[in-house]
Image (cartoon, helix red, strand yellow):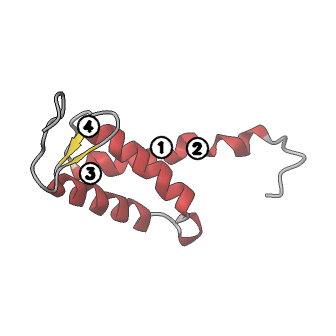
Amino acid sequence: MLPGRILFPEGVHVTSSGAVFSPDLIALMKAVLEDASAALPEAKRTSAIRAEMACHILAAAGKGERNPEVLKTLAVGSLVDCTHYSHDISPERRVV
């Protein structure tokens, strides 16, 4: 073993920020992402939106959140912050 290196049990994932995610937590986060995605209209289930939700799930899990409902709420709620672009368009230029 190299000095300064820590060996983690097999299956444990360590992010670049140092957050440690066990296989069970990874499975939970994946299930939350799938559930949050399924709650969206099909047209909104893009890889970009899934990536945005995944970032918020990872951030919350990295801070210790484990409640699936809270993680899902944070993931879907993050999309509200992302949709501000439609408000930047003047009413005259809006299609709808």
**Mark 2 in CB contact with mark 1 (< 8 angstroms):** yes
Q: Between tags 2 and 4, which lies in front?
A: 4
Residue 72 appears in the rendering: yes
* Amino acid type, callout 2: Cys
For disc 2, the marked residue is 82
Q: Using the numbered discs, state the Cα–Cα distance from disc 2 to disc 3 in whole angstroms.
A: 20 Å
Q: Residues within 10 Å of mark 3 (few under 14, many from 20)?
A: few
* Amino acid type, callout 4: Ala
Describe the element under mark 2 as helix, strand or loop.
helix
Q: Nearer the N terminus, badge 1 or badge 4?
A: 4
* Amino acid type, callout 3: Glu
Q: Between tags 3 and 4, which lies in front?
A: 4
Residue 74 appears in the rendering: no
Q: Using the numbered discs, state the Cα–Cα distance from disc 3 to disc 1 in whole angstroms.
A: 14 Å
Q: Nearer the N terminus, badge 2 or badge 4?
A: 4
Point out residue 13 in the picture as x, y percentages from the top left corner: 23, 49
Q: Nearer the N terminus, badge 3 or badge 4?
A: 4
Front in this rendered view, residue 92 or 72: 72
For disc 4, the marked residue is 19
Residue lying furthest right in this view?
Answer: 92
Q: Between tags 2 and 3, which lies in front?
A: 2
For disc 1, the marked residue is 78
Point out residue 64 in the picture as x, y percentages from the top left corner: 21, 36
Q: Quadrant of residue 80?
A: top right
